[in-house]
Image (cartoon, coloured by chain):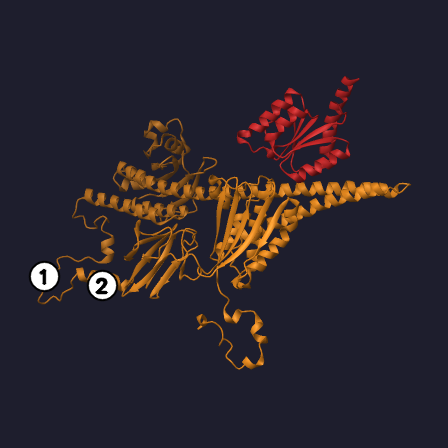
Chain colours: A orange, B red
Amino acid sequence: MASLFVIQGSDQGTRFQLEESVHTVGRTQNNSIRLHDTEVSRAHAELVRRGDLYVLHDLGSSNGTYVNGQPTTERELVSGDQLQFGKSLLLYTGFVENAYEDLADKVDIVPRSGSHDNSRIVAALSQAEGSEWLMPDADSSSSPWLARARGNLQIMYRTALAVSHTMDIDQLLARIMEMIFDWVDADRGCIMLKDAETGKLVPKVRRHRRGLRTDEKITISKTILDYVVDRNEGVLTSDARDDERWDPAQSIVKMGVREAICVPMQGRYDVVGVIYIDTSITPQRMLANQGKANQFTEEHLRLMIAIAHQAALAVEDTSYYKALVQAERLAAVGQTIASLSHHIKNILQGVRGGSYLIELGLGDHDRTADAAEPDDQAAAKAVDTIRKGWNIVERNQERISTLVMDMLTFSKEREPEPQASNLNEVAADVVELLKSRAEQSGVQLVWRPSEAMPTLMFDPEAMHRAILNVVTNAIDACEDVPEGQVTVSTEYDTRGKLARLFVQDNGPGIAPDDLEAIFNVFVSRKGGRGTGLGLPVSRKILQEHGGEILVESQPGAGSRFTLELPASPVSVEKEPPERMTQPVASADLPANAHSDSSVH
Amino acid sequence: MSCKARVLIIDASDEARDVLRMLLERQGAETLEAGEARQASEIARREQPDVIVFDAESDRSPSNQATVDLGRTASRSAIPIVVLGTAKRPLSPLPTGQFVSKPYHYAPLIRRIEELLGKRVGMRSGKAD
């Protein structure tokens, strides 16, 4: 089955199965491929099935449709095509049969008899043998040099595989250690990584030769470790007593290390750790080997350095990636906390001011009550102080409630709960609620509802919040303007099937440079007063409804915000229960007989 | 010249200014107000208040130029400034500044302003005598 997979954009990770004969791509709910992308048009493009493939048509979208980076109006899609609508990038995967068919034309499979092909099998290799192509030859027919070279290539190949297949450091190191043991005859081995904070080497993986006691501690000479890390050189030590470099420190001698390889794990930027292997040769074995003590050679050393480098790159990648993710997360958390505590602090300051006034007013009141002569004027003044304080407390209580509601709306992964509602009613509620605030700010709030606003399906509570935030902003913007005026109006666009709510103010307007930023979370142009949550929350709500908020602004003349709500008409079964109370005469008709034909 | 102490309040929040004004008026002081630091320096120069209460967040001018201007005006006339702020910023542009961190309590703030006023008004009435 064909599919579209969103690889970039707000819907990243979503897969759309293509099974209909026509799929439409757009921002609104009625599209089978709905993208939550403001740069995608409401009806952006369509995919029409033609046999075993889909043809993409752009439907006159404002930002265009691109296939593999090329602007496209019509195009047959093939597997692997990258489709771009707005900021969203989608990967198209065609029908599987489709791929077979294409190739079948190019490759002929013919019966052996009567073919022009006279090939015969000269060599056969099983799958298992094939994957061991780098293993040293068991029979010594080929030269020992070649066998060794193959072995070396094999271990590098396996290291590369191990490194590319895992992001888990401990698992990766364990595998590398295991491979080293398969390849070289070592007794004990250990990988140590530098601790990011202390810089000390911390053992991560250790391993013993089979048969060796595993509870035995690995003791590693600090002299060797320091040399390797400080000089960034791998070392091969063979019989430490012969090597004057180790002479001053007798640690190797005491531990009886005969041969060891210790290599730095050099990454792109730094030594991230060391890999250490050793082997001790008993006198008996020396005799058995006829005096040939060398287990480890310079070739081993060279290869170990290469392996350690590979491992170090993987360690670095993983830890930098982790650090990056962590740092981003911390930065975001830090910004959130800083911003929120700033608002809460301002609210708290307001509450303190208000309650201090109340406290003083109560004190004044008590004094007038205790006074020998009743002083009406003083009593009235005391009450006035209390009232002023109370108003401030109440205002700040309202502020904290708005902040909490906005935070909840913004953080919740919520789906709107649509119900049959009227945009005029919701907007009228908001206007009513903000009347006193507008009066206080000396702003005239005008309400002009459209007469023809149908009942639509949307989440009235969420829309209330979305409108509230925009209108509040408009009132705040007009505060310092003489004869400030905010006009809230609605209209219903029958053709576009769209309800619009306009909030027009005659405030100072928004500078073109700021227009981009106003929907960013925690960006506020209101200084200490704004939470920077209002508009992002409003936009989130509108987008959840498949709509959008548009802004036009002229610095010095004011701004107009347009909330576009795509109309989801009320379906019959969800319509308000007026039908139930219809005259008995029509009760024998089917319930939906007189409803519009689009229902059928 | 009136002997009433005069306080210039610079705060972006109307509410904070309202509260401070009411509280200072109860103490018999006169208040002058500015919503933005930009206007503050000019008012301070013209009106020569006895104390300036300055909310550091009310300065939205680039690189805090308004704060620097205010500091110059204040130190020229040796006007003490009470700086209300979130984090203790270096007071270098405000040589006559005293820091009060937000959120503050009003009672101690008023006491502090009164102390400063007491000194100033005392000085002035001393000269007048």
Helix, strand or loop at label 2? It is helix
Between A504 and A289, the one lying in front of the other is A504
Same subunit, labels 2 and 1: the answer reads yes
Which kind of residue does numbered mark 1 sit on? Asp
Q: Counting residues from the N terminus, which is met first, the one under dot 2 or under dot 1?
A: 2
Q: Position of residue A201 (x, y in %)?
A: 43, 37
The chain to which mark 1 is attached is A
Q: What count of labels does the image hold?
A: 2
Q: Position of residue A466 (x, y in %)?
A: 55, 53
Q: Which mark is residue A117?
A: 1
Residue A72 versus residue B15 in the image, above or below: below
Between B51 and A381, the one lying in front of the other is A381
Helix, strand or loop at label 1? It is loop
* In this picture, residue A80 sits left or right of residue A333: left
Q: Position of residue A314 (x, y in %)?
A: 36, 43
Q: Residue at x 73, y 23 (%)?
A: B120
Q: Which residue is mark 2?
A: A101
Instruction: Look at the image and tell me in which quarter the N terminus of chain A lies.
Output: bottom left
Q: Are marks 2 and 1 in contact (CB under 8 Å)?
A: no
Q: Residue at x 63, y 54 (%)?
A: A432
Q: Quadrant of residue A46?
A: bottom left
Q: Residue at x 36, y 56 (%)?
A: A5
* In this picture, residue A73 sits left or right of residue A547: left
The chain to which mark 2 is attached is A
Between A502 and B24, the one lying in front of the other is A502
- Neighbourhood count class around disc 2 (C-alpha, 10 Å): few under 14, some 14–19, many 20 upward: few
Q: Which mark is residue A220?
A: none
Q: Quadrant of residue A271?
A: top left
> Mark 2 and mark 1: span between their CA atoms?
23 Å
Q: Residue furthest right?
A: A372
